[in-house]
Image (tube, helix red, strand yellow):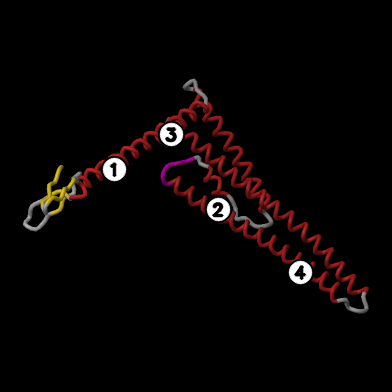
Amino acid sequence: MDGYLALRSRQTSYESELDVHQTQLEDFQLLSNRRAELSKQLSAAQADYAAYIASESTLNISMHNKFSLRVSSLENELESATQGIASLVAQANRYSNSQKQYASYLKRTGQEEYAAYEYQTSVGYTEENFLSETTDMIRRMEIGAKRWHERVSSYCEQYGLTPYDFERYLQERHKLSDAYLSALQRLDSLTTSVETASMEDNKQVSPPGGSTVPQKDNIDTVEISKRGQFWRFL
């Protein structure tokens, strides 16, 4: 299992990074397309506004406000899309730098061939190179994931098994571990309850004179009063 887990962790690292960059690329493309569409709409709205101003000799406040609000709304949406792109680029740079630091840690601890090493040669992201750099990282992560998938499969074949067999074994082991932990927690809970009950049953009070008697509330008693005398039955 140690050999399988070591290989599988490297495969997983490439698969995880592939997901990260695919998500980043999709977000960038959505924002870029949105900005391009808003830019077209804004240009058309500005042209319509200018045409209206040129054609009207007397200003119509209602129409003026309508065109003005349309232009202002599109300008705000366009600015929001532009800020979204800038934020995405900055986030990608922070992530890339953190992965470079992680790669340095892996190198110091002798853990090589993880996906983090792919970031060591990456350049800083800009709006202009984001598409090309992200596409290149996706390609590299796909190659790495495929390479480690083949190595994992080859390792499993040495034992006459498949990666599915190893994963199924891990799942069963996790289930047993969870069940064992749950049983220990239940046992601890029951033990605590029994100890608490025992302590409650054994509570004692010390009356004046130093003698020790059980608390009345914890004793099953009946008291009968007759001519000022009391008999207690335990």
**Residue at position x 52%, y 30% in the image:** 152
Numbered disc in front, either 1 or 4: 1
Q: Secondary structure at mark 4?
A: helix
**Within-10-Å neighbours for mark 3: few <14, some 14–19, many 20+:** few
Q: Main secondary structure of the magenta part?
A: loop
Rounded to the nearest whole Å, what is the CA distance between mark 3 and mark 2? 32 Å
Q: Secondary structure at mark 3?
A: helix
User: Which is more N-terminal, label 1 or label 2?
Assistant: 2
Q: Are marks 1 and 4 in contact (CB under 8 Å)?
A: no
Q: Secondary structure at mark 1?
A: helix
Above or below, 26 against 67 in this view is: above
- Amino acid carrying label 2: it is Tyr
Numbered disc in front, either 1 or 3: 1
Rounded to the nearest whole Å, what is the CA distance between mark 1 and mark 3? 28 Å
- Amino acid carrying label 4: it is Ser
Q: Which residues are magenta?
A: 108-112
User: Which is more N-terminal, label 4 or label 1?
Assistant: 4
Please tell me the numbered disc located at residue 174: 3
Does 215 sit left or right of 10 as displayed?
left
Rounded to the nearest whole Å, what is the CA distance between mark 2 and mark 1? 49 Å
Quarter of the figure that contains the C terminus:
top left
Please tell me the numbered disc located at residue 72: 4
Q: Position of residue 222 (x, y in %)?
A: 18, 46
Frontmost residue, 187 versus 107: 187
Q: Are marks 3 and 4 in contact (CB under 8 Å)?
A: no
Rounded to the nearest whole Å, what is the CA distance between mark 1 and mark 4? 68 Å
Please tell me the numbered disc located at residue 95: 2
Does 232 sit left or right of 19 as displayed?
left
Q: Secondary structure at mark 2?
A: helix
Does 170 sit left or right of 216 as displayed?
right
**Within-10-Å neighbours for mark 1: few <14, some 14–19, many 20+:** few
Q: Which residue is mark 1?
A: 193
